[in-house]
Image (cartoon, rainbow, N blue to C red):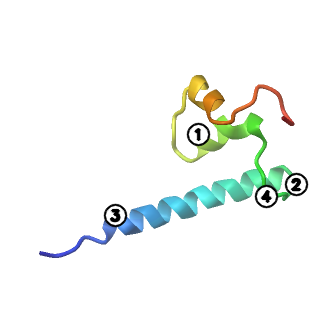
Amino acid sequence: MAIDDDDDDDETRLCVDVRDVFDLFDFWDGRDGLVDGFKVGDFLRCCGLNPTVSQVSSNGGMKKLGR
């Protein structure tokens, strides 16, 4: 039985893609290694997810910039 390494490749690619998105958001926020809580929803959407407002709020999303 052959082992399928495609799953590992997909996971690696997903990690690289998420890191690329993080780097862009971090660049826009001043290269401090953080992404503002106000942008969590946008960050997740750029990663290909479709979170609800409730999910964003319960996972660190903020309603005002800079919090």
The location of residue 9, given as percent across then percent down, is 40, 68
Residue 64, how many percent across, how many down? 82, 27
In this figure, which residue is indicated by the disc labeled 1? 45
Q: Earlier in the sequence, mark 3 or mark 4?
A: 3
Query: Could you classify mark 1 by the number of other residues whose Cα lies within 10 Å: few (under 14), some (14-19), or many (20 or more)?
Result: few
Q: CA distance from mark 2 to mark 4?
A: 8 Å
The residue most toward the bottom is 2
Judge whether 16 appears above or below 44 on screen.
below
Mark linked to residue 7: 3
Q: Are marks 2 and 4 in contact (CB under 8 Å)?
A: no
In contact (CB < 8 Å): disc 3 and disc 4: no
* CA–CA distance in space, label 2 to label 3: 34 Å
**Which one is earlier in the sequence, the residue at label 1 or at label 4?**
4
**Which residue type carries mark 4?**
Gly
In front of the other: label 1 or label 4?
A: 4
Q: Earlier in the sequence, mark 2 or mark 3?
A: 3
Q: Quadrant of residue 23?
A: bottom right
Image quadrant where residue 18 sits: bottom right
In the picture, measured across the screen, residue 8 lies left or right of residue 65, that is left
Residue position for label 2: 30
Locate the C terminus and report the quarter of the image it occupies: top right
